[in-house]
Amino acid sequence: MDLTNTIKQFIFTIIVNNNENMAIRNTDSLIESGIIDSLAIMKLLTFMEKKFSIQISSNDLMPENFESIESISKMVANKLN
Amino acid sequence: MIHFSLTSEQLAFKQCIIEFAAKELNENLAEKDDKAEFPWKNWKKCAGMDLLFLLCPEEYGGLNLGLPAAVASIEGLSYGCRDSGLVHSIVTQLCCLIQIALFGTDDQKEAYLPTLGKGEKIAAQAITEPDAGSDVFSMGTQAVKEDGHYILNGSKTFISNGPLADLITVFAVTHPGRKKFGGISSFIIEKGVHGFSAGKPLKKMGLRTLQNGELFFDNCRVPAETLLGKNGQGMILFNEVIEWERALLSAAHIGTMERILESCIKYAKGRIQFGQPIANFQSISHKIAEMKVGIELGRLMLYKAALMKEQNKRATIETSIAKLFISETLKKTCLEAVQIHGGYGYMKDFEIERDLRDSVASTIYSGSSELQRNIIASIAGL
């Protein structure tokens, strides 16, 4: 599974608990929709750091990096490169 | 596997703090507790020992100890100093300082870190509101940007050091539509700014020398340069600093429990009932064994979390586990200590009753035990 889909699947299964009514496209705003809250961000960070063996620092923790699945994937891809 | 041990220098520093605190910080505690007075003299003594500089970068005059050594230092302070309100006040100062050290601009660091480290200014962190406690990000305080300034309106409550604070890191909503993430920002507000006022200290059950109160922002207009971190970074900033806070407060609780344990052992050995020391009765010795188990297990988890922070690793679940376990153990330890001391434990002269009163809030502040369980369950995979 590619990076974007791995993140998307985690958000769908763990953060929105497989809620079929929450169809999330890669460019949808996770912030405006309220999907990313304080607990969700910690779960997501813990998952990404483990899954991709990366370290996400305070400087990376900017709202724009977590705006959508696309922007999250881009940040992770930059770290992997 | 995580391995940790303190260096001989760190252990010597901890011992030095214990001796200082035991000698200098315990005068007239019952009177200060009764009057709910902030111990200014002792605050200055602690500053003189560089205790407020523990986590400050060296270029601003600090000791830059790192979290494990800072945790050991606070543990030592709380073991030697029987004024838990003062220790809490010092931890609050350290947390505000670390916020600025981690997220501040060079100008902000230059302006605030040296004075906070020297204790010349007292800092507070303003998050909790009358209608936003555990659900902290439902806060109502707003900061609206206008002509290179932010205008703050709202109020905060229960703020530690609030009534005395010279500067406050204030969390406010900057993007109402994005309240949960990206919508909250943090600001450094100084006392004396037009539109800001602090209420009188609130009367409390315990931690009475610590001053807690309400803060009010009424069209409080501050320059955009007071923004701490980036616009919308408030939740991230909070999540980071709360890990430091949970570790440092837990360190204080471990120090307190160690002191109480020793007091219980001494009393149990000296108190004669039915012709023998009460320590001979398993009903007493088992209570003391449980205290020891709690301290040792709590300390292991705490130092694991502190070491992870020093290695720049995320320690959300580790600090939550430490905070939950240690604060619950503290309350239980204090209650059992009163029981071991019997009628004397209930009297003010023995000070155990003050420790018990001081312990009650530990499972409420810095995230209640219920909230810690939510965090742990959530990150564990629920």
Image (cartoon, rainbow, N blue to C red):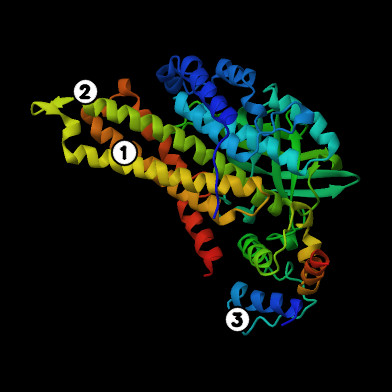
Task: Say which residue label 1 marks.
Answer: B335
Q: At label 3, which amino acid type do we have?
A: Asn
Q: Residue at x 28, y 30 (%)?
A: B265
Instruction: Give the Cα separation between the discs numbered 2 and 3.
Output: 63 Å
Few, some or many residues within 10 Å of mark 2 (<14, 14–19, 20+): few
Task: Say which residue label 3 marks.
Answer: A19
Task: Say which residue label 2 marks.
Answer: B270
Q: Nearer the viewer, residue A40 or B314?
A: B314
Quadrant of the snapshot with the N terminus of chain B = bottom right
Q: In the picture shown, does residue B229 fall above or below A60?
A: above
Few, some or many residues within 10 Å of mark 1 (<14, 14–19, 20+): some
| Callout 2: chain | B
The answer as to whether the residues below labels 3 and 1 share one chain is: no
**Left or right of B200 on screen, residue A58:** right
Residue A35, percent from left and from top: 67, 70
Q: Quadrant of residue B330?
A: top left
